Amino acid sequence: MKRTTMWTAVSAAGLALALAPALAQESPFAKYQQMTAEGSPVELFELVGEELWTKPQGPKNVSLEKCDLGMGPGVLKGAYAAMPRYFKDTDRVEDLETRLLHCMTTLQGRSPEEATQRLFGNADKPSEMEYLSAYIAGHSRGMDVSPGMSHPKEKASFELGKKLFFHRAGAWDFSCASCHGEQHKRIRMSALPVLSDPKQAGPIVATWPAYRVSNSQFKTMQWRINDCYRQMRMPEPKFASEATVAMNMYLTVTGRGFPYSGPGTKR
Amino acid sequence: MNRRPTMKRTLLLASGGAFLLAACASGPVSERPKVTSGDLDQVTAVLKRDFKERGQAKMDRVNLDEVQRTCNLHKDNPPASVAQRLEQAQLKAIPFPEGSLIGNWKAGEKIAQGGRGAMWSDKPGAAAGGSCYNCHQISPKEGNHGTIGPSLLGFGKTRGSGPDMQRYAYGKIYNAKAYSLCSHMPRLGHSGTLTPQQIKDLVALLLDPASPVNQ
């Protein structure tokens, strides 16, 4: 069903493209991006995410509706755009998925093992985290990305993330900057944003989490960081660890100030 | 659903330039921070705590060797004397095979195309690729190439294919750090990603007069 929806939407987008040549005069990639945005099934993910947010689950059989994402229990509007941020109750900096995990294990009484059993989904079966991320991020559209930058732990998280970004290690001696550190570079045909550059990091953090057309999957920022480390030939970062949140913090602070326009659609 | 109009979304995505101008991003490009030996130890300790082994990607990969430590400490630009000493040590450790280092360029082309190998998602022991096209232009027949490394088009044609050039090409692929200490290029032989025969095949792709690289 999903695939049919996609193709119909993509064809429709193709038609729109033909009718709007002025919009399509940039690179083939801009055209492709435009088409994929038109055909994005992001709304479907947001709808399922809403169901999961309100569905009673876990030993306590309660929903996540009282989860405090930083704006007060159950407040969704603008919550994602203000993350990562420091949370007093856990005394740590958390990004969206880290915070969701906290709510699942406290509010719903689920075990960390159960809640982290299937963090990254696939095209056939997306994960609960992915659906929820789509739903919650969608409530920040139009709001400026403004992560926490005042608490000492927020500052420390940013500084750690910056060090991690430039730290070369692993079997292939890579750092994040090996690919995302120089202007106008590509891997194969994929343009590489310089993520230490606010102008380039901005549109990136303003559009994650995102739907990837190439594999029909909805992906979160925790996944994005995880998959970069996979390709860097490093061991696997633990989900919601301080290191992954710090990396997210570094990228988000660097790219702050852009209006959130996700969940996005990527190639 | 609080979705904004589709047209607005289209405009935003289609006109990246205008999007950038409209936004008020905040700070300058963040420079690579100057780190001390203590900082490196701190980051390594964080990696040990927050990462876990998976498949063939074991935790020993977070330990820094002297090359990585030096490049991190000097932001990839160590003093010449330090760089030379370490480059020579890396060069000395390359086990150059005897005889011709030119293998089969057709096999080399396949290895250059392949992007798998050394990742936790790769089957241990399965033949790896060199990920060469990810960063380099190599054969003129492959337009889908990256630009992080220099173009290698006409590599053998312009440099010749004698024993010295074979040795250089083999050594550079085996351990790029032996020639430029903080090169972006992975040490494909030294890291155990590619076998000596695979590296010879890549040397052939670069140097063999029959290779499309040199047409």
Image: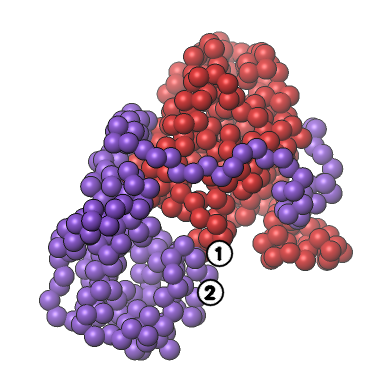
Chain colours: A red, B purple
Up-down relation of residue B150 to residue A204 (above or below): below
Q: CA distance from mark 1 to mark 2?
A: 9 Å
Q: Quadrant of the C terminus of chain A?
A: bottom right
Q: Between residues A251 and A4, which one lies in front from this camera angle? A: A251
Looking at the image, residue A231 sits to the left or right of residue A212; the answer is: left
Locate residue B136: give its quadrant. Answer: bottom left
Q: Residue at x 46, y 34 (%)?
A: A161
The location of residue B19, given as percent across then percent down, is 75, 48
Q: Residue at x 37, y 85 (%)?
A: B158
Q: Residue at x 24, y 62 (%)?
A: B178
Label number found at residue A189: 1
Dot 1: few (<14), some (14–19), or many (≥20) neighbours within 10 Å? Answer: some
The location of residue A179, given as percent across then percent down, is 47, 53
- The residue labelled by disc 2 is B143
Dot 2: few (<14), some (14–19), or many (≥20) neighbours within 10 Å? Answer: few
**Chain letter, disc 2 residue:** B
Looking at the image, residue A173 sits to the left or right of residue A208; the answer is: left
Amino acid of disc 1 = Met
**Residue A13 can be seen, yes or no:** yes
The location of residue A261, given as percent across then percent down, is 72, 40
Looking at the image, residue A85 sits to the left or right of residue B162; the answer is: right
